Amino acid sequence: MVASIEKEWWIGLDLNYSGENNFASFFPSNGNIHSYPAKAVPEMVVSLLKKLKEEYSITNVLDPFVGSGTVALECKYLGLDFCGSDLNPLSILLARTKSLTVNNTSFVEESLKEFISLLNKEYSPEKLVELFNFDNIEYWFKPENIKELSFIKQEINLYLQGHNKEYRETFALILLTAFSSTVRESSLTRNSEFKLYRMSPGDIDKFDVNSISVFTNKIDNLLGLLVETNKLSIRKTETNIQLKNAKDLSHLKQKKIDAVLTSPPYGDSQSTVAYGEFSKLPLQWSKDLLFRYLNIPTTIDNVDEYLLGGKKSTSDTSLRKIIRSSTTLRNLFKEMKIVCRDASEKYRMLIDDLEIIMKDVKGNKFDPSKLIRNTELYELVKERIRLDYYRIFNKSGKLSNKEVKLKAKRLTEIFLSELNGDNLCSETVQILSNKLPFVKETLKRKVIALPRRVRQVLHFFKELYLVVEQTDQVLVESGVQAWIVGHRTVLGSITVDMAEVLNDWFLSLGYDKVITLHRQYSFKRLPHHINSTVTRKNEIKTMMEEHIVIVRKYTSAE
């Protein structure tokens, strides 16, 4: 069957779902069990799986970037066997829990409800509890939450010790997933963000979460969802989810895969999603229990460094090979080199202009119009002033994070109006003089960072190509692959066409291109814009559209 006929199968498939990002395609949004960055949309995943099952008669699916387990759960719902892997231990916990088959549900429900009832009865603020500890624990948690979480962890351990192996894994998955989510909600992090940022002191003062109550609710929600999932599943399926690197799928041994459905990282964690930072606090609290009861090891302090494109992640694929295999990537490389060269020259010129202004300030010959006319330098100075105000007010602890931002912005505008005014005082000039060396350092760092950023982007693609090769090796003849990607922006202005890079690579490996589908983001957890890392003024559009690359492995018989 030729690819043109297959293309007709996919035309008209509407993937532009709106609303909330649900726990599953068959459950409402209020059933979410654990937050996780950049989760795939369940309705989209199930639509793709149904089409793959209908048109290609697939029976099993591989997702080498399993994440929170959306593909795993939807496969179970449709009666498809599933294999998945990830390097993030939290990902393995969540994916295994989502796809868990609960046997003897009445016994499991009764046992866990009894556990929760006793937990609530036995805990009181006056109760003596052996406190859990790790570096900076008091920075991220209030004392009362440390005590509550320590008690919950202690009781989970005692409870799991008292159960036989038949049910221990089921209880461990449910309890530790609920505990992990409770840790997130009990922490002093800005939970709306992926990376670890502490709340402002003002927000910390207002923070009031009872970890025991949160944990109780998490167990109730999770248990109900798992029981309903089992009822709705078409047939009993096999699910195999392992803590493995997607660059090496040898753990699948001789098992052959009918289809790959995956959403890979769109770039290294430094510039896109920091999965490791997101997972750090839950793993610090529960890593010993994860290993003891689920054999999920947490041996890496910062998993981000080992994910695709991470600074400690290595690959033996040559850069020449991956560029030769993709015209799109080759053109990207050329464009990055040109932008890097031009931007470096521009920043060096700005440094020269800044040194002249600094010399004028030192010699009491400062002319504000010189700075104002130089738009780039002016914006850098403005950002430096705003940042200093932000740090002062944030440290004071009297304001919320929103209030800190607004006050810093307002005072920055007042300072700049004084700088632009007719009666410029020596104190304003002195404040400016103190900030200009920091602006110069920012520009110098940018000159150094540009070529390094080019190397990081190429390093990510070298690693992604290895995964593409690995999926090809485990896929059956005539097997199909569907990759969900976004087009990211690098170096502030260059759009990376991830879909076409993948299409190029698959064609070089002997695949037929079937179709590339497109859908608008409506509720994926990503910001609409990010700020330039130089001036923080120019907004850069983030990925607002997803692209689903569909390819099929070519066979000579066809």
Image (cartoon, rainbow, N blue to C red):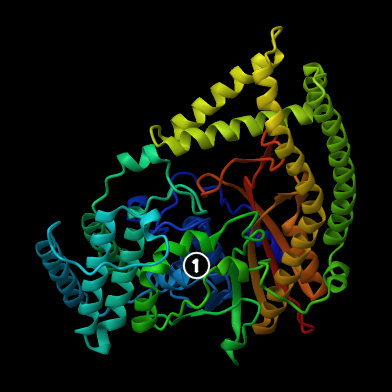
Q: Which residue is mark 1?
A: 71
Residue 142, horizontal then vertical, whole percent = 31, 52
Q: Is residue 346 left or right of residue 39?
A: right
Name the quadrant containing residue 556.
bottom right
Extreme residue in the left direction: 121
- In the rendered image, the residue lying farthest to the top is 422
Tell me the quarter of the picture where residue 118 sits.
bottom left
Residue at 50%, 58% (x, y): give it. 39
Q: Nearer the viewer, residue 308 or 85?
A: 308
Question: Is residue 116 visible to the viewer in this orientation of the structure?
Answer: yes
Q: Between 26 and 504, which is closer to the camera in this rendering? A: 504
Residue 47 shows in the view: no
Q: Tally the numbered discs.
A: 1
In percent of width and height, residue 543 lies at 64, 47
Q: Position of residue 32 (x, y in %)?
A: 36, 56
Residue found 70% across the figure and 57% down from its top: 516
Q: Residue at x 41, y 68 (%)?
A: 284
Q: Residue furthest bottom?
A: 254
* Pick the front one: 75 or 383: 383
Q: In the rendered view, does 129 fall on the left or right side of 499?
A: left
Above or below 147: residue 208: above
Q: Amino acid at mark 1?
A: Val
Q: Which corner quadrant holds the N terminus?
A: bottom right
Identify whether 557 is placed above or below 354: below
The structure residue drawn at horizontal position 26% and vertical position 80%, both measured from the top left corner, is: 103
Residue 49, horizontal then vertical, whole percent? 53, 66
Q: Is 29 left or right of 114, judged from the image as shown?
A: right
Tell me the element at label 1: helix
Q: Residues within 10 Å of mark 1 (few under 14, many from 20)?
A: many
Q: Quadrant of the C terminus?
A: bottom right
